[in-house]
Image (cartoon, rainbow, N blue to C red):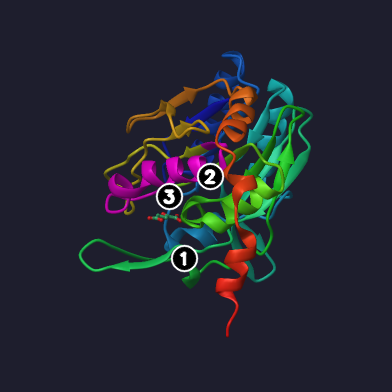
Amino acid sequence: MAAIQLKVSSNKMDNLMNAIKKIEEAAKAGANIAILPESWNTPYGTEYFSKYAEEIPKGMCSNQISIAAKENEIFVVAGSIPEKCGHNIYNTTTVWNQDGQLVAKYRKIHLFDIDIPGGITFKESDTLSPGNEFVTFSNGIAKFGLGICYDVRFTELANIYRQKGCSVLIYPGSFNKTTGPLHWELLHRARAVDTQSFVVGVAPAEDIEASYVSHAHSLIVDPMGIVISQAGKEEEIIYAKLDMEIVKATRCQIPVFDQRRTELYETIQKPS
Ligand SMILES: O=C(O)CCC(=O)C(=O)O
Protein backbone atom coordinates (compact mmCIF):
# COMPACT_ATOMS: atom_id res chain seq x y z
CA MET A 1 0.00 0.00 0.00
CA ALA A 2 1.17 3.52 -0.81
CA ALA A 3 0.01 6.67 0.98
CA ILE A 4 0.78 9.66 -1.21
CA GLN A 5 1.46 12.85 0.74
CA LEU A 6 0.91 15.19 -2.18
CA LYS A 7 2.01 18.81 -2.52
CA VAL A 8 -1.18 20.71 -3.33
CA SER A 9 -1.13 24.08 -5.12
CA SER A 10 -3.86 26.43 -6.30
CA ASN A 11 -3.47 25.10 -9.87
CA LYS A 12 -5.96 22.27 -10.33
CA MET A 13 -4.32 20.91 -13.48
CA ASP A 14 -0.89 20.81 -11.80
CA ASN A 15 -2.42 18.98 -8.85
CA LEU A 16 -4.02 16.43 -11.14
CA MET A 17 -0.84 15.85 -13.17
CA ASN A 18 1.19 15.49 -9.98
CA ALA A 19 -1.30 12.99 -8.53
CA ILE A 20 -1.11 10.90 -11.71
CA LYS A 21 2.70 10.97 -11.66
CA LYS A 22 2.74 9.80 -8.04
CA ILE A 23 0.21 7.02 -8.69
CA GLU A 24 2.50 5.77 -11.45
CA GLU A 25 5.50 5.96 -9.10
CA ALA A 26 3.62 3.99 -6.42
CA ALA A 27 2.60 1.31 -8.92
CA LYS A 28 6.17 1.01 -10.21
CA ALA A 29 7.33 0.55 -6.62
CA GLY A 30 4.97 -2.44 -6.38
CA ALA A 31 2.05 -1.00 -4.43
CA ASN A 32 -1.35 -2.60 -5.14
CA ILE A 33 -3.30 0.33 -3.72
CA ALA A 34 -2.47 4.05 -3.74
CA ILE A 35 -4.19 6.63 -1.55
CA LEU A 36 -4.32 10.39 -2.14
CA PRO A 37 -4.95 13.01 0.58
CA GLU A 38 -8.07 14.96 1.47
CA SER A 39 -8.63 17.95 -0.81
CA TRP A 40 -5.89 17.07 -3.32
CA ASN A 41 -7.20 18.98 -6.35
CA THR A 42 -7.76 22.24 -4.44
CA PRO A 43 -6.26 24.16 -1.55
CA TYR A 44 -8.28 23.31 1.56
CA GLY A 45 -10.69 26.13 2.44
CA THR A 46 -14.38 27.00 2.17
CA GLU A 47 -13.51 29.81 -0.25
CA TYR A 48 -12.15 27.27 -2.77
CA PHE A 49 -14.60 24.36 -2.69
CA SER A 50 -17.23 25.58 -5.17
CA LYS A 51 -14.60 26.80 -7.66
CA TYR A 52 -12.75 23.46 -7.74
CA ALA A 53 -15.84 21.22 -7.43
CA GLU A 54 -16.63 18.64 -10.10
CA GLU A 55 -19.39 16.18 -10.78
CA ILE A 56 -18.47 12.57 -10.06
CA PRO A 57 -17.77 10.57 -12.18
CA LYS A 58 -18.34 13.05 -15.02
CA GLY A 59 -15.57 15.51 -14.10
CA MET A 60 -11.99 15.78 -15.34
CA CYS A 61 -10.40 14.48 -12.12
CA SER A 62 -12.57 11.34 -12.04
CA ASN A 63 -11.86 10.71 -15.67
CA GLN A 64 -8.08 11.05 -15.36
CA ILE A 65 -7.79 9.08 -12.10
CA SER A 66 -9.82 6.28 -13.66
CA ILE A 67 -7.34 6.17 -16.57
CA ALA A 68 -4.36 6.26 -14.18
CA ALA A 69 -5.79 3.33 -12.16
CA LYS A 70 -6.29 1.30 -15.32
CA GLU A 71 -2.98 2.14 -16.99
CA ASN A 72 -1.02 1.35 -13.83
CA GLU A 73 -3.23 -1.61 -12.82
CA ILE A 74 -3.60 -0.30 -9.29
CA PHE A 75 -6.50 0.40 -6.90
CA VAL A 76 -6.71 4.14 -6.24
CA VAL A 77 -8.42 5.71 -3.24
CA ALA A 78 -8.62 9.20 -4.67
CA GLY A 79 -8.37 11.16 -1.41
CA SER A 80 -11.11 13.73 -1.61
CA ILE A 81 -12.26 16.50 -3.90
CA PRO A 82 -15.24 18.84 -3.66
CA GLU A 83 -18.11 17.08 -5.46
CA LYS A 84 -20.81 19.10 -7.18
CA CYS A 85 -24.23 17.45 -7.14
CA GLY A 86 -27.19 19.66 -7.97
CA HIS A 87 -27.02 22.66 -5.64
CA ASN A 88 -24.91 20.77 -3.08
CA ILE A 89 -21.18 20.35 -2.66
CA TYR A 90 -19.78 17.35 -0.77
CA ASN A 91 -16.30 16.44 0.41
CA THR A 92 -16.02 13.15 -1.48
CA THR A 93 -13.64 10.21 -1.77
CA THR A 94 -13.75 7.90 -4.75
CA VAL A 95 -12.23 4.44 -5.17
CA TRP A 96 -11.15 3.06 -8.57
CA ASN A 97 -10.14 -0.55 -9.29
CA GLN A 98 -7.38 -1.81 -11.60
CA ASP A 99 -9.79 -1.69 -14.53
CA GLY A 100 -10.48 1.98 -13.89
CA GLN A 101 -14.01 1.33 -12.63
CA LEU A 102 -15.52 3.41 -9.85
CA VAL A 103 -16.15 0.90 -7.03
CA ALA A 104 -16.98 3.22 -4.12
CA LYS A 105 -17.88 6.82 -3.38
CA TYR A 106 -17.94 8.22 0.15
CA ARG A 107 -19.17 11.67 1.19
CA LYS A 108 -17.74 13.02 4.46
CA ILE A 109 -20.36 12.41 7.16
CA HIS A 110 -19.08 14.64 9.98
CA LEU A 111 -18.35 18.13 8.73
CA PHE A 112 -15.41 19.99 10.25
CA ASP A 113 -17.03 22.79 12.25
CA ILE A 114 -14.87 23.83 15.19
CA ASP A 115 -13.96 27.01 17.03
CA ILE A 116 -10.81 27.16 19.16
CA PRO A 117 -10.23 30.84 20.05
CA GLY A 118 -6.61 31.78 19.31
CA GLY A 119 -6.21 28.46 17.49
CA ILE A 120 -8.46 27.56 14.61
CA THR A 121 -12.00 28.36 13.55
CA PHE A 122 -13.34 26.43 10.59
CA LYS A 123 -16.86 25.82 9.32
CA GLU A 124 -17.11 23.35 6.46
CA SER A 125 -20.88 23.47 6.75
CA ASP A 126 -20.80 27.07 5.40
CA THR A 127 -20.36 25.57 1.94
CA LEU A 128 -20.50 21.77 2.20
CA SER A 129 -23.32 19.31 2.78
CA PRO A 130 -22.77 16.13 4.82
CA GLY A 131 -23.01 12.62 3.42
CA ASN A 132 -25.26 10.07 5.11
CA GLU A 133 -23.81 6.73 4.13
CA PHE A 134 -21.17 4.34 5.46
CA VAL A 135 -19.08 3.06 2.57
CA THR A 136 -16.87 -0.02 2.33
CA PHE A 137 -15.09 -1.76 -0.53
CA SER A 138 -13.01 -4.91 -1.03
CA ASN A 139 -9.94 -5.54 -3.17
CA GLY A 140 -9.94 -9.32 -2.84
CA ILE A 141 -7.47 -9.19 0.05
CA ALA A 142 -9.28 -7.09 2.66
CA LYS A 143 -12.40 -5.06 3.31
CA PHE A 144 -11.85 -1.34 3.71
CA GLY A 145 -13.96 1.33 5.48
CA LEU A 146 -13.85 4.96 4.37
CA GLY A 147 -13.88 8.20 6.36
CA ILE A 148 -12.48 11.68 5.78
CA CYS A 149 -10.38 13.68 8.24
CA TYR A 150 -12.73 14.95 11.02
CA ASP A 151 -14.57 11.59 10.74
CA VAL A 152 -11.58 9.97 12.49
CA ARG A 153 -12.71 11.65 15.73
CA PHE A 154 -15.90 9.58 15.76
CA THR A 155 -15.33 6.16 17.24
CA GLU A 156 -18.90 5.17 16.27
CA LEU A 157 -18.08 5.27 12.56
CA ALA A 158 -14.93 3.17 13.03
CA ASN A 159 -16.82 0.63 15.14
CA ILE A 160 -19.54 0.32 12.51
CA TYR A 161 -16.85 -0.52 9.95
CA ARG A 162 -15.42 -3.16 12.29
CA GLN A 163 -18.93 -4.58 12.65
CA LYS A 164 -19.22 -4.65 8.85
CA GLY A 165 -16.09 -6.81 8.66
CA CYS A 166 -13.47 -4.21 7.72
CA SER A 167 -9.79 -4.78 8.52
CA VAL A 168 -8.47 -1.48 7.15
CA LEU A 169 -9.82 2.03 7.75
CA ILE A 170 -8.76 4.80 5.39
CA TYR A 171 -8.99 8.48 6.30
CA PRO A 172 -7.70 11.01 3.78
CA GLY A 173 -7.24 14.03 6.06
CA SER A 174 -5.76 17.47 6.46
CA PHE A 175 -5.27 18.39 10.10
CA ASN A 176 -3.91 21.84 10.97
CA LYS A 177 -1.18 23.34 13.12
CA THR A 178 -3.42 23.57 16.21
CA THR A 179 -5.04 20.13 16.42
CA GLY A 180 -2.51 18.27 14.27
CA PRO A 181 0.43 18.08 16.70
CA LEU A 182 -1.90 17.03 19.52
CA HIS A 183 -4.46 14.78 17.90
CA TRP A 184 -3.46 13.54 14.40
CA GLU A 185 -1.34 10.55 15.42
CA LEU A 186 -3.27 9.95 18.64
CA LEU A 187 -6.63 9.64 16.85
CA HIS A 188 -5.39 7.31 14.12
CA ARG A 189 -3.70 5.09 16.69
CA ALA A 190 -6.82 5.19 18.87
CA ARG A 191 -9.09 4.05 16.03
CA ALA A 192 -6.57 1.29 15.21
CA VAL A 193 -6.64 0.02 18.80
CA ASP A 194 -10.45 0.44 19.13
CA THR A 195 -11.19 -1.56 16.02
CA GLN A 196 -8.06 -3.74 15.87
CA SER A 197 -7.62 -2.70 12.25
CA PHE A 198 -4.99 -1.07 10.10
CA VAL A 199 -5.66 2.68 9.97
CA VAL A 200 -4.28 4.98 7.29
CA GLY A 201 -4.27 8.79 7.41
CA VAL A 202 -3.17 10.57 4.23
CA ALA A 203 -2.54 14.32 4.28
CA PRO A 204 -1.34 16.99 1.85
CA ALA A 205 2.29 18.06 2.34
CA GLU A 206 2.91 21.15 4.47
CA ASP A 207 2.77 24.45 2.57
CA ILE A 208 3.44 27.39 4.86
CA GLU A 209 2.26 29.84 2.16
CA ALA A 210 -1.25 28.31 2.11
CA SER A 211 -4.18 29.91 3.93
CA TYR A 212 -4.72 26.56 5.72
CA VAL A 213 -1.43 24.84 6.56
CA SER A 214 -1.63 21.04 6.59
CA HIS A 215 -0.04 19.24 9.54
CA ALA A 216 1.07 16.56 7.01
CA HIS A 217 2.72 13.47 8.70
CA SER A 218 0.66 10.88 6.77
CA LEU A 219 0.78 7.56 8.58
CA ILE A 220 -0.06 3.87 8.53
CA VAL A 221 -0.89 2.24 11.87
CA ASP A 222 -1.21 -1.47 12.57
CA PRO A 223 -3.97 -3.14 14.65
CA MET A 224 -1.83 -2.99 17.82
CA GLY A 225 -1.50 0.77 17.42
CA ILE A 226 2.07 0.70 16.13
CA VAL A 227 2.89 3.38 13.55
CA ILE A 228 4.51 1.25 10.86
CA SER A 229 5.16 4.07 8.39
CA GLN A 230 5.03 7.85 8.72
CA ALA A 231 5.87 10.81 6.48
CA GLY A 232 7.47 14.09 7.48
CA LYS A 233 6.17 17.45 6.24
CA GLU A 234 7.35 17.32 2.62
CA GLU A 235 5.84 15.65 -0.42
CA GLU A 236 6.54 11.94 0.00
CA ILE A 237 5.12 8.49 -0.64
CA ILE A 238 5.11 6.14 2.32
CA TYR A 239 4.69 2.39 1.90
CA ALA A 240 3.66 -0.55 4.05
CA LYS A 241 2.75 -4.17 3.51
CA LEU A 242 -0.45 -4.91 5.40
CA ASP A 243 -0.33 -8.40 6.85
CA MET A 244 -3.91 -9.49 7.51
CA GLU A 245 -2.63 -12.19 9.86
CA ILE A 246 -1.85 -9.38 12.34
CA VAL A 247 -5.52 -8.37 12.28
CA LYS A 248 -6.57 -11.96 12.99
CA ALA A 249 -3.98 -12.44 15.73
CA THR A 250 -4.79 -9.14 17.49
CA ARG A 251 -8.52 -9.86 17.47
CA CYS A 252 -7.92 -13.36 18.78
CA GLN A 253 -5.40 -12.39 21.48
CA ILE A 254 -7.36 -9.39 22.82
CA PRO A 255 -10.98 -10.37 22.04
CA VAL A 256 -12.65 -7.13 23.19
CA PHE A 257 -15.20 -7.19 20.41
CA ASP A 258 -16.69 -10.46 21.72
CA GLN A 259 -16.36 -9.30 25.33
CA ARG A 260 -18.53 -6.21 24.97
CA ARG A 261 -21.39 -6.12 27.53
CA THR A 262 -23.93 -4.68 25.14
CA GLU A 263 -26.79 -5.70 27.44
CA LEU A 264 -25.37 -3.36 30.10
CA TYR A 265 -24.65 -0.50 27.72
CA GLU A 266 -28.17 -0.66 26.37
CA THR A 267 -29.69 -0.71 29.89
CA ILE A 268 -27.62 2.26 31.02
CA GLN A 269 -28.46 4.24 27.89
CA LYS A 270 -32.21 3.66 28.12
CA PRO A 271 -34.06 6.66 29.56
CA SER A 272 -35.80 5.73 32.87
O1 LIG B 1 -10.35 17.31 13.48
C1 LIG B 1 -9.48 18.13 13.24
O2 LIG B 1 -8.82 18.66 14.13
C2 LIG B 1 -9.17 18.55 11.83
C3 LIG B 1 -10.23 18.11 10.88
C4 LIG B 1 -10.09 18.65 9.52
O3 LIG B 1 -9.19 19.40 9.22
C5 LIG B 1 -11.03 18.26 8.48
O4 LIG B 1 -12.00 17.57 8.76
O5 LIG B 1 -10.81 18.62 7.32
At which x and y percent is residue 15?
Answer: 50, 38
Magenta span contains residue 147:
no
Of all residues, the one furthest to the left in this rendering is: 118
Q: Residue at horizontal 68%, vertical 25%?
A: 74
Q: Is 6 situated above or below 126? A: above
Label 2 and label 1: CA atoms lie apart by 17 Å
The majority secondary structure of the magenta stretch comes to helix
Task: Looking at the picture, tell me which residue is in the foreground, 13 or 6.
Answer: 6
Circle on res. 124: 1
Q: Is 166 situated above or below 49? A: above
Quick one: SS at disc 2?
strand
Quarter of the image with the C terminus in it: bottom right
Label 1 and label 3: CA atoms lie apart by 14 Å
Q: Are marks 2 and 1 in contact (CB under 8 Å)?
A: no
Q: Is residue 184 visible?
A: yes
Q: Is residue 40 visible?
A: no
Of all residues, the one furthest to the top in this rendering is: 29
Q: What are the residue bounds of the magenta stretch?
A: 174-199
Label 2 and label 3: CA atoms lie apart by 18 Å
Task: Looking at the picture, tell me which residue is in the foreground, 234 or 264.
Answer: 264
Q: Which residue is label 3 attached to?
A: 43
Q: Which residue is label 2 attached to?
A: 171
At which x and y percent is residue 91?
Answer: 57, 57
Q: Nearer the viewer, mark 2 or mark 3?
A: 2
Q: Quadrant of residue 97?
A: top right
**For the residue with label 1, is its CB less than 8 Å from the closest atom of ligand 1?**
yes
Looking at the picture, which amino acid does disc 3 mark?
Pro
- State which image quarter holds ligand 1: bottom left
